Amino acid sequence: MAVFIALLAVFTFLGFYGMKWRKGDLRLLHEWALAGRRLGWFVVWFLLGADLFTAYTFIAVPSGMLASGSLYFFAVPYVAWGFAVALITMPKLWEYSKEKGYVTAADFVKDRFGSKSLSVLVALVGAIAELPYIALQIVGMQAVLAMLLIGLTGKVNTTVSEVALVISFIILAAFTWTSGLRGATLTGVFKDVLIWITVLGTIGYVVLTAGGFSHAFEVAGTTSLTNASKAVVKAIGGTAAIYGYLPPNEALIAAYFSLALGSAFALYLYPHAINASLSSDSSRNLKVSTALMPIYGIGLALIALFAVLLYDYPQAVALIEHAKSGALAVPALIGAAMPDWFVGLAFAAIFIGGLVPAAVMAIAVGNLVARNIAKELKPLSPAGELKVAKWVSFWIKFVALAFVFAVPPTYAISLQLLGGILIAQTLPAVFIALFTRKLNPHATLAGLVAGLASGIYMVLAANNFGLIKTTLFHVGGYLIFIALLALGINLAIVAIGTAIAYGLGWRPEKVKE
């Protein structure tokens, strides 16, 4: 606990110190929200890593592997493909943004299409998709607090856990208000260093002392532990033990591929990913930062395999079964395997791993509301823009916190699954429009609306209009990620609508690039 508290104190110091780091005029939105677009490749690499590899990633991927087996390993190719998408799109968006002063993707959409309706809808989708994403960082943080309290008192004290979260978010809101992205960047570097120590230290220690992966797979295949595994998976609402899911399944191969591809398209459409990318000091340095991101993909693969290493420690398996929570997979493994001081460091890494991306996400939502929603309703001065962005950034954190306190984690996860489908529908308006002006704005708006509507309907239908447990839809005997199906409808309408517009005499406005 002492190590955990000490590291949180360092995190707090760095957050507030951010206002003095690489000084700029923090009365301007781009200085507060994008750190003045002056971050070098190494810092942006850390920031993107802190932004995209979150507490929920640390908790959810191994939990998913434990409950559903190797299907959840789709997260590894998805981030690799996502970085390829980013290399193609983000430097170009950065160049437009630097030249014309864009702060959000919706700024670009408004200028490219000349459509307020389209830019407002893109901003709304981005803001809505971020809310459950922030909430899920809190779910990850709750898992760490639960393990800490179990270690100290033998049980989870909900009141203590909630008070600790509220205090943490007050600190986060305070330094985000004063330091903006600079504070998030410094704390992000700190968080990433702790995460890498946690991942490499845990893997190395378990391999050297408990037999590592070969022993874990061997034990997982024995009758006794396979039965125990089934009990764990049943307790957390899964479908089969991981060991039994390793052989490929034809329906799941399609699901695996489509989940990876759809998620790769969506990854850099999220406002927080765009926000971090636009903070780079040049498009060339952004390319370097993005090219190095697969290193984090290796880290994610190792984190996913924590679900296998769990079988090296029967006491960790028993704890998950008793708690009926797959979210405890990584904390339980670390608590069972590592010395106390390392447990404090690792838990602090995961906890801070929720706070840092929550800060960037809140800043990104503030930007969207200020620049692309509030400003369309009422003209705002630069000072007015910043004020709106700060207040939205402040309150969105506590809305997400209240959401987690009021709604079971299962519902938060369900909404996040839906959020990924929704944000993918902005691809034509943002990514494709980066490379062509030939998309008709009315057709693009119609495609976006159709993609959103069809995506929501398919999700509801796939779950029998009840709690969202899956985002896969049966098509010809295969399970396909709904984001891709909805995006296909979206693109078809954009293409057909644009063709009709051309037939009626519409032509894109000629503008000198």
Image (cartoon, rainbow, N blue to C red):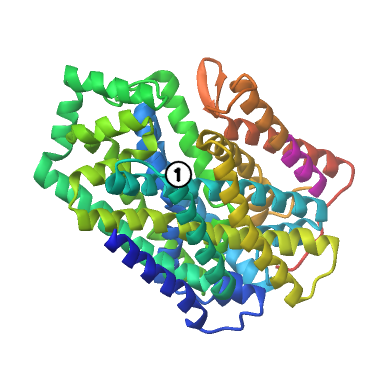
Which residue corresponds to the image point at 63% horizontal and 73% vertical from the top-left? 30
Regarding residue 500, the answer to whether it shows in the image is: yes
Residue 27 locus on image (x, y percent): 66, 80
Regarding residue 245, the answer to whether it shows in the image is: no
Q: Is residue 445 magenta?
A: yes
Q: Is residue 253 left or right of residue 96?
A: left
* Direction right: furthest residue: 504
Check disc 1 and report the residue beneath it. 158
What amino acid type is highlighted by mark number 1? Thr
Residue 180 locus on image (x, y percent): 56, 71
Which residue corresponds to the image point at 78% horizontal and 56% vertical from the top-left? 113
Mark 1: which secondary structure? helix
Span shown in magenta: 441-450
Give residue 403's quadrant in the image.
top right
Q: Work out whether 188 lies above or below 351.
A: below
- Bin the neighbour count of mark 1 within 10 Å (Cα to Cα): few under 14, some 14-19, many 20 and up: few
Q: Work out whether 255 lies above or below 351.
A: above
The C terminus is located in which quarter? bottom right
* Direction top: furthest residue: 477
Q: Work out whether 469 lies above or below 276.
A: above
